[in-house]
Image (cartoon, rainbow, N blue to C red):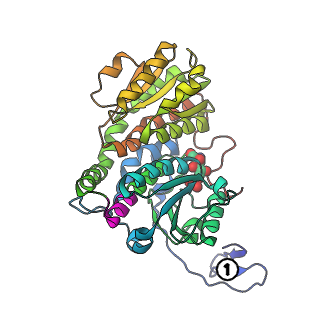
Amino acid sequence: KNNEMAVIRRGEPLSIFEIDSHTPSKISIKQLKLSLAQLEKGGYDTFMLKEIFEQPTTLRDCLRGRITGDCSRVTLSGVELNRDRFLQAERITLVACGTSWHAALIGKRLIQDFCQIPVEVEYASEFRYGNPVLNDRDIVIAISQSGETADTLAAIQLAKDKGAFVYGVCNVVGASIPRATDSGTYIHVGPEIGVASTKAFTGQVTVLTLLALAVGQLRGVIDSSTVQSVATALNAMPGTIEETLKCNDAVQKLSMFFTYAHNFIYLGRGYNYPTALEGALKLKEISYIHAEGYPAAEMKHGPIALIDQEMPSVIIAPSDSLYDKIISNVQQVKSRGGAVVAIVSKGNTAMKDIANFCIEIPDVPECLTPLVASIPLQLLAYYIAVNKGKNVDQPRNLAKSVTVE
Ligand code: M6R
């Protein structure tokens, strides 16, 4: 804890005491369920590639025990133990930073669609200084891989001081955020070593999907057929991600065409606008190429001016309710000489005639498309950075846990 010091001497018991008073602290030792293999590269060149390819396994771990065998119910102990809070909630605010904030944007859509509760998403760094109006009917969900992000911790403290119920969605067991929150759900994806978050992002989106289904059921506002179809597809997600990862060679090949680009734009709509933001962040972080993510329909309000032969676009266009709309963005980019990499659902032949490159992803319910669409985007960023000879695991100027403001 803050203001404590631990002394470890070979052959002697561990001692922890308060720095100022030297009073010994109570020690509670928990053994982490970690294997050495989880901390090694396991035959991959980098931790990031290992973590990308681990996602079928990490999602299996994340889902374990949370969906009933017949896929008719989702149970999260954090929700079950706080039923009244979730039943009485008048608003949910999601706070996070970076990739976790992108997961929060997807969480907003999921909670609105399945729970019919108003949802807001805030950068933790803005929330903490934004004088938020909160009361005991508010739930604040803090999302963090490391569980140590300073801005997110400060946002949690502020929310608690104002009487809100604070729920954590974290990866690192026993970290500061799970200890500071009232309750929560671990994503259980194992240690993430690469600075660029990959498996934690898909774990966070998976937990937020489970949470939205569980709370929707609890409040009686989601029909059983929706639960059944989403839970069935979610249960099958480890296999679906395995299938998606088969795009690896195609993505590696196409990455060669873009290694020397200076700018990229990523476009998506609805559930995949946050996926576009996340794809752009991955590219920026590890390849140092400037990349912007945009909701596709906003392109005509400004960013379209940037499009020329030098500015490739990555367009996320699964066969969902917004597919017909996004196809016009592809045409707009093409007619201005821009190259298009389109992420499309399996079997989409029409896009092959328009886009320069098509990467196919398996067909899943619309709310789960970010999980599959993010895989080729992680690989694209990875291979472009590797082609440029960058250190993908430890990109310049970045730290894995941002424990300072
Ligand atoms: O540990 P956290 O999820 O709280 O970290 C938040 C961000 O610092 C983190 O997601 C960062 O943006 C990653 N480098 C993204 O790849």
The location of residue 348, given as percent across then percent down, is 29, 26
Indicate the quadrant where residue 60 lies: bottom left
Relative to 20, 367 lies left or right = left
What residue is at 43 percent from the left and 40 percent from the top? 270
Q: Position of residue 88 (x, y in %)?
A: 43, 70
Asked whether the viewer can see residue 58, the reply is no
Picture coordinates of residue 321 (x, y %)? 34, 36
Query: Which range of residues does the magenta coloring cover?
Result: 210-221
Q: Quadrant of residue 14?
A: bottom right
The residue positioned 49% from the left and 46% from the top of the image is: 198
Evaluate whether residue 68 shows in this view: yes
Determine whether the residue tagged by mark 1 lies in a helix, strand or loop. strand
- Is residue 218 in the magenta section? yes
Q: Quadrant of the N terminus?
A: bottom right
Main SS category, magenta section? helix
Residues 92 and 27: in front is 92
Q: Farthest residue in the right direction? A: 20
